Image (spheres, rainbow, N blue to C red):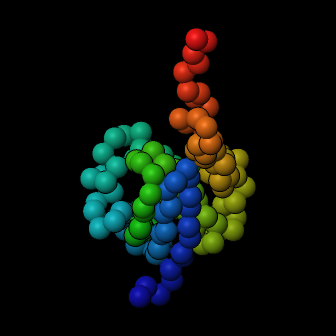
Amino acid sequence: MAAQEYIATGRRKEAVARIRMSPGTGKIEVNGKAFEEYFPTANLQSAVLAPLQIAKSINAFDVVVNAHGGGPNGQAGAVRLAIARALIISDANLRASLKEEGFLTRDPRMKERKKAGQPGARKRFQFSKR
């Protein structure tokens, strides 16, 4: 186990990301894969790295991520929140800059539940007059 480890959890939609962040060289591993392999698009990669860029610590920490549930976007959002929370644990002075960028806010939007007597959350069965 590393000398100093910061453990945090992030959630978005149905996705949950648990991370262990320790001082290192900037290596990020998600579910046993390289970060670039797990999040192949530039959009997802920049979303995950955003809190580290704000904190100016891109190559200062090694991050091991365990992500499950949801899709790629939800998981990237969950990882971003977890990294932001871990950065605050490591250095409380980063709170203001991370909060200003909105990285500490848990996105509350969730899938709406299916209602009884309907095929979906909002959709109704076809109406037939006769």
- Above or below: residue 119 compared with residue 12: above
Residue at horizontal 45 percent and vertical 52 percent from the top: 70
Q: Nearer the viewer, residue 6 or 113?
A: 113
- Above or below: residue 98 compared with residue 112: below
Residue at horizontal 43 percent and vertical 85 percent from the top: 2
Q: Is residue 80 visible?
A: no
Asked whether, in this view, residue 34 is left or right of residue 113, the answer is left
Q: Is residue 103 visible?
A: yes
Residue at horizontal 47 percent and vertical 73 percent from the top: 20
Quadrant of the rendering where the C terminus is positioned: top right
Asked whether, in this view, residue 61 is left or right of residue 81, the answer is left
Provide residue 86's location: percent of width, then percent of height: 57, 68
Q: Nearer the viewer, residue 119 or 67?
A: 119
Residue at horizontal 36 percent and vertical 63 percent from the top: 30
Q: Residue furthest top?
A: 130
- Above or below: residue 87 compared with residue 113: below
Q: Nearer the viewer, residue 93 or 108?
A: 108
Provide residue 77's location: percent of width, then percent of height: 52, 50
How many marks do you count on the picture?
Answer: 0
Provide residue 87's location: percent of width, then percent of height: 58, 65
Quadrant of the rendering where the N terminus is positioned: bottom left
Provide residue 125's location: percent of width, then percent of height: 55, 27
Asked whether, in this view, residue 31 is left or right of residue 54, the answer is left
- Above or below: residue 77 compared with residue 66: above
Q: Residue furthest front?
A: 130
